[in-house]
Amino acid sequence: MLLIYAGRYSEDFAKLLANKSLSYRKIGEVFLIDGSEEDILDALYDAEEHLLKEIKLTFAKPEELKDPKLLLNLGFKSIGFKDFLETKVFTDLSKILGEAQTYFHAIVSTKTKKVFGFEALCRTKIPVWKLFQMSDRVAFISDHYCREKALLEFKARFFGNYKLFLNFHPKFLKDPLENVGELEATLRIKGIDPNLIVVEIDEYEGMDIRALKMIRSFLKSAGIGVALDDVGAGYAGLYQLVEINPDIAKLDMNLVRDVHKDRLKQSIVKALVQACKEAGIRVLAEGVEKREELEFFLELDVDFIQGFIFSKPDPYPKIRQIEELAYNSISSY
């Protein structure tokens, strides 16, 4: 049985449990829930931030609820939701990651009208971004595992010169020589040509620019490409673009979405694309879903398109189908 203290937000917590059809007993501001751990955690994932900061959790046996001393001890053992979840997740991490799937999202070249490569996306029961927000040990293991799994499945599933875009979480890019050396060694062991790999750097605001430039230099010397994500998302993104000079700039999806309806977006995107072209940086429009968005970027002669207009992420992308759709869509423009 799980005991949860909800404090001043008891009414909010009661509504949350009711919405999730979880039965409970309530003693003051303490909730006794006798459901499965999975159902309880599923309910808490949807709780609002103010509630998650307030609640305290602990497990109890039925006999402990009858003894005042044991009950008091349970109160001292209760911990916040984040600490509870981190402990739970770390204990079950092998199961969570063992059930993970790698999805590949196609990136289409507007010049060849064929698939240029795939971005590897790791899908787990608990969203990966939530795992990264937990303790460093959980985040590090998850980041490393997802990348290793992506490389193994890329090697097994794709034949040809497709590029594989790999995401690296910035919090682990603190030692450029070690980071790149480890990646090179992994590729060598798995028999993957470094020229097929593109390291995609995102969430880079606040990172040491010198470290990023060193990573860029080491990757380039190893024959590995670099893509900068979310370009155009504020001043910081533009600064990183200038300083890092990546091989590929991925336009921020907020700029791509409905760009054909917004003149200000169009002006910003045109300036970004022109600047990248002059610097020899190839441009990727990410999140393209509509025909009008596609036509706008074809007009600007961007290099790559990624989005639902051609395909959704899939463990086994249907390359022939994607290329047929891309060829017809681009050729008819």
Image (spheres, rainbow, N blue to C red):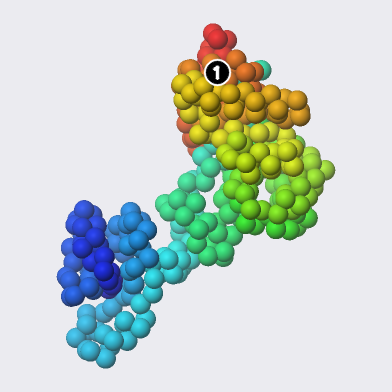
Q: Check the image and name the residue furthest to the right.
A: 221
Spot occupied by residue 133 in the image (x, y as percentages of width and height): 50, 58
Asked whether, in this view, residue 214 is left or right of residue 206, the answer is right
Q: Considering only vertical position in the picture, is 291 above or below 120?
A: above
Q: Considering only vertical position in the picture, is 295 above or below 53?
A: above
Q: Nearer the viewer, residue 183 or 55?
A: 55
Numbered marks: total: 1
Q: Check the image and name the residue furthest to the front.
A: 264
Q: Of the residues shown, which amino acid type is indicated by label 1?
A: Phe
Q: Considering only vertical position in the picture, is 86 above or below 260?
A: below
- How many neighbours does mark 1 have within 10 angstroms: few (below 14), some (14-19), or many (20 or more)? some
Q: Quadrant of residue 249?
A: top right
Dot 1 corresponds to which residue?
A: 296
Spot occupied by residue 147 in the image (x, y as percentages of width and height): 60, 49
Q: Nearer the viewer, residue 255 or 47?
A: 255
Q: Residue at x 50, y 34 (%)?
A: 254
Asked whether, in this view, residue 92 is left or right of residue 58, the answer is right
Q: Considering only vertical position in the picture, is 290 above or below 18?
A: above
Q: Is residue 318 visible?
A: no
Q: Nearer the viewer, residue 17 or 196?
A: 17
Image quarter in which the C terminus is found: top right
Q: Residue at x 72, y 50 (%)?
A: 209
Image quarter in which the N terminus is found: bottom left
Q: Secondary structure at mark 1?
A: helix
Q: Residue at x 52, y 34 (%)?
A: 253
Q: Quadrant of residue 62?
A: bottom left
Spot occupied by residue 291 in the image (x, y as percentages of width and height): 47, 17
Spot occupied by residue 155 in the image (x, y as percentages of width and height): 64, 40
Asked whether, in this view, residue 262 is left or right of residue 68, the answer is right
Q: Is residue 252 visible?
A: yes
